[in-house]
Amino acid sequence: MDTRMLEYFVAVADERNLTRAAGRLFVAQSTVSAGLRSLETELGVRLFDRDTKSVSLLPAGQDLLPIARDVLDGLDTMRSTAREAGSGLRGRVRVGTFAALRVFDLPGVLGRFRLEHPGVDVQLVTSATGSTGLIGDLVKGRLDLAFVALPVPAGVAAEAVVRRPFVAVVPESHALATRRTLSFADLAGEDWVDVLPGFGNRVQVDARLREEGITRRLSAEVADLPSVGPFVAAGIGVAVVPDVIDAVGCRVVPLSDRMPEWVVSLAVRRGGERRHAIAALAEALRSGSAEAGRSDDGGRSNAPR
């Protein structure tokens, strides 16, 4: 079996579109279509239901897709292991992260890793939809590692590296700034500042507000967590965010409502850690985050500030 046919199969399954799959693989659409027909003939089953606009997996395709991914991952592992023999770690590792992940010294960890393993090309990638987009890219094989703040699907390994409580953030001059604690009900009638949909902390807050039956008015949606503080300080609105932001000009107040912690995990794509370069970088990132946790004071103070 030609492994290129498996690559066509996985790309079409990910993209649900022949044109996009062909573009991803830098081949003609007719080549992808012919490869799929050859694969279906060789396997004796139809993998896709195809029409002029869309492509969807049939049951046989759904069953065979994880096996095809494993085969391709195994081949990648063989190639990288062969390249590394006698010359140290080599290859490319694609890491998904937030636009401004400041909970530990990511640049420092990557800099030390590069000095130790100069043959590994580390590429950082962000997503406009935060953890939701990063998890999707990880599952589709576009990323090897990703920092995510949402639960991962089956087949993706993840280990928590950062935990922080959620807090309320209000302008220093706000009437609620003198309170010792605040609830979602206290904030319900205010204008709000939050990150874009898809980010893990936004998903958690939206879910909690639905539980409370609260519909809020968003006056600003910003691209990353560090941007929340300046908008709140300027009086644009209030926020409920993980206790990781620079709150200059704001008061940070503990929540009286129960709220699960914001948990950032390092997720690894299916079969990823069989590749030595991915495994080594994952270990360096885990160690770097653990070191930052030990040097922290165990979390932010619960006193308003």
Image (spheres, rainbow, N blue to C red):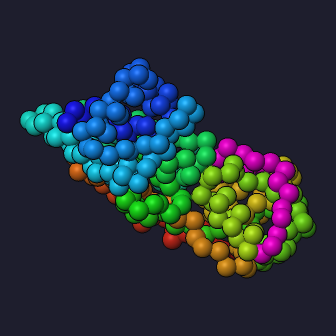
Left or right: where 267 falls relative to 89: right
In this rendering, the answer to whether 142 lies above or below 245 is: above
Left or right: where 19 falls relative to 115: right
Which residue is at the far left? 86
Q: Residue at x 44, y 23 (%)?
A: 29
**Quadrant the N terminus occupies:** top left
Q: Residue at x 72, y 45 (%)?
A: 222
Q: In the image, is residue 130 part of the stretch drawn in magenta? A: no
Left or right: where 140 falls relative to 304: left
Front residue (pair 201, 5): 5
Residue 44 picture location, percent across and down? 27, 44
Q: Is residue 83 visible?
A: yes
- Residue 171: which quarter of the image? bottom right
Residue 177 picture location, percent across and down? 83, 68
Magenta stretch in the rendered image = 212-231
Front residue (pair 207, 120): 207
**Quadrant the C terminus occupies:** bottom right
In this rendering, the answer to whether 263 lies above or below 108 is: below
- Residue 210: which quarter of the image? bottom right
Front residue (pair 209, 9): 9
Q: Number of numbered discs present?
A: 0
Q: Residue at x 72, y 79 (%)?
A: 257
Q: Residue at x 71, y 56 (%)?
A: 247
Left or right: where 162 falls relative to 75: right
Which residue is at the far top? 28
Residue 169 picture location, percent across and down? 75, 62
Q: In the image, is residue 221 part of the stretch drawn in magenta? A: yes
